[in-house]
């Protein structure tokens, strides 16, 4: 968990985290925004850049480690969470970030991301969701909506899409959030919260692939739609959205969400967001909200504390050393429980 900078005493700037590599994404790609906000976010803390590691798999977003002036690993398809987990166990002094996409993280990497989340390693996962395989030229991905026309679904996708935040809730991840590439301020606030969280933080970023799936999220985050189709989560506050004079709120009736006209005098009747609720029920309900019947929530869905896997494992190792000593690897290999094959 990187410490905050003292107020008014900047040690770093965005440029300190920019590498000397030419950034190679398509002009207009949402990944530029994600990269820039990440660099600005890290500059807020006192942790030096050699204490950060960015680990990725395969995909357009997975090029990000090249563009960070930190340590980085470009690993194999879907396995970045597992590599990051191994690194976390042996290096408790690092801030470890996993960069993945909806294809890399939820298809071939689905099993790896699930177990990283449920074990609660102390690391941060950013999943860039553009609902397509951009690097391999526009096939449908695990998050593509039913009916999406792509090179691999010319008659429309018939797969039911994966909801990334549902996977995180089902795995009981301790920090779950959603943001989008068109709002750097919101994205930066979410990244900052994630960086401070102890445990696995999982952030879905809705991102635009300008070439193969342009404006996929526009029906929700587009300037003309966002007032009615987005709601920003605030801990301890009811869910309220909409343009002035036409605001709406969310109310629960037998745990079924209802959209009602907002009335400040009736706030006690509305569903109030509690990101610290240890039970995942309400968080799961939030992941199910979205057009056409409800707005899509953005912000921090869940932020709870639980022991981390790496701390517990290293604690067991230390206990064993105290009880049995450090051990002798040579003696173990050449001990009595070996045999010779002739």
Image (spheres, rainbow, N blue to C red):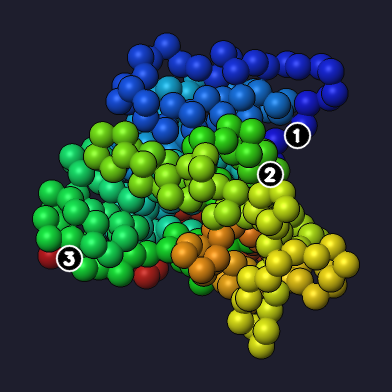
Disc number at residue 92? none
Q: Residue lying at the far bottom in this picture: please name it.
A: 254
Count the numbered circles shown: 3
Where does residue 260 sit, x and y in percent of width and height? 68, 71
In primary-sequence order, the first of circles 2 and 1 is 1
Q: Where is mark 2, residue-wise?
A: 193
Where does residue 154 sit, x and y in percent of width and height? 11, 55
Residue 330 in sight from this viewpoint = no
In primary-sequence order, the first of circles 1 and 3 is 1
Side of 10 where 156 appears, left or right: left
Other residues around mark 3 within 10 Å, as few (<14) / some (14–19) / many (≥20): few
- Give the residue displayed 46% in from the left and 16% down from the top: 19
Question: Where the N terminus falls, by quadrant?
Answer: top right
Q: Is residue 102 above or below residue 181?
A: below
In primary-sequence order, the first of circles 2 and 3 is 2
- Give the residue displayed 30% in from the left and 69% down from the top: 160
Where does residue 186 sit, x and y in percent of width and height? 63, 39
Other residues around mark 1 within 10 Å, as few (<14) / some (14–19) / many (≥20): few
User: Mark 3 falls on what kind of element?
Assistant: loop
Q: Quadrant of residue 335?
A: bottom left
Q: CA distance from mark 1 to mark 3?
A: 56 Å
- Give the residue displayed 72% in from the left and 49% down from the top: 244
User: Mark 1 falls on what kind of element?
Assistant: loop
Disc number at residue 3? 1
**Which is more foreground, mark 2 or mark 1?**
2
Q: Where is mark 3, residue-wise?
A: 341
Q: CA distance from mark 2 to mark 3?
A: 57 Å
Side of 46 where 182 appears, left or right: left
Q: Quadrant of residue 287?
A: bottom right
User: Mark 2 falls on what kind of element?
Assistant: helix
């Amino acid at each position: 968990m990187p410490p905050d900078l003292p107020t008014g005493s900047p040690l770093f700037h965005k440029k300190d985290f920019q590498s000397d590599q030419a950034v190679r994404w398509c002009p207009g790609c949402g990944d530029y925004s994600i990269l820039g906000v990440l660099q600005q976010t890290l500059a807020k803390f006192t942790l030096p850049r050699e204490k950060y590691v960015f680990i990725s798999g395969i995909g357009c977003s997975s090029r990000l480690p090249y563009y960070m002036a930190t340590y980085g690993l470009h690993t194999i398809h879907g396995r970045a969470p597992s590599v990051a987990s191994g690194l976390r166990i042996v290096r408790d002094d690092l801030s470890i970030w996993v960069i993945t996409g909806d294809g890399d993280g939820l298809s071939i990497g689905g099993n790896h991301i699930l177990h990283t989340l449920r074990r609660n390693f102390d690391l941060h996962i950013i999943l860039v969701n553009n609902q397509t395989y951009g690097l391999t030229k526009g096939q449908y991905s695990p998050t593509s909506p039913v009916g999406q026309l792509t090179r691999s679904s010319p008659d429309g996708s018939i797969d039911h899409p994966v909801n990334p935040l549902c996977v995180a809730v089902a795995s009981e991840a301790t920090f779950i959030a959603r943001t989008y590439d068109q709002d750097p301020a919101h994205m930066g606030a979410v990244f900052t919260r994630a960086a401070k969280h102890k445990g696995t933080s999982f952030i879905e970023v809705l991102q635009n692939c300008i070439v193969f799936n342009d404006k996929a999220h526009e029906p929700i985050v587009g300037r003309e739609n966002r007032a009615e189709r987005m709601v920003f989560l605030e801990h301890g506050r009811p869910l309220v959205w909409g343009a002035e004079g036409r605001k709406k709120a969310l109310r629960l009736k037998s745990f079924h969400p209802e959209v009602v006209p907002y009335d400040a005098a009736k706030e006690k009747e509305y569903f109030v967001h509690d990101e610290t609720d240890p039970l995942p029920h309400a968080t799961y309900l939030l992941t199910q909200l979205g057009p056409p019947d409800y707005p899509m929530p953005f912000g921090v869905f869940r932020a709870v504390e639980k022991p981390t896997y790496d701390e517990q494992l290293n604690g067991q190792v230390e206990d064993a050393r105290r009880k049995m000593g450090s051990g002798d690897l040579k003696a173990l290999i050449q001990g009595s429980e070996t045999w010779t094959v002739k």
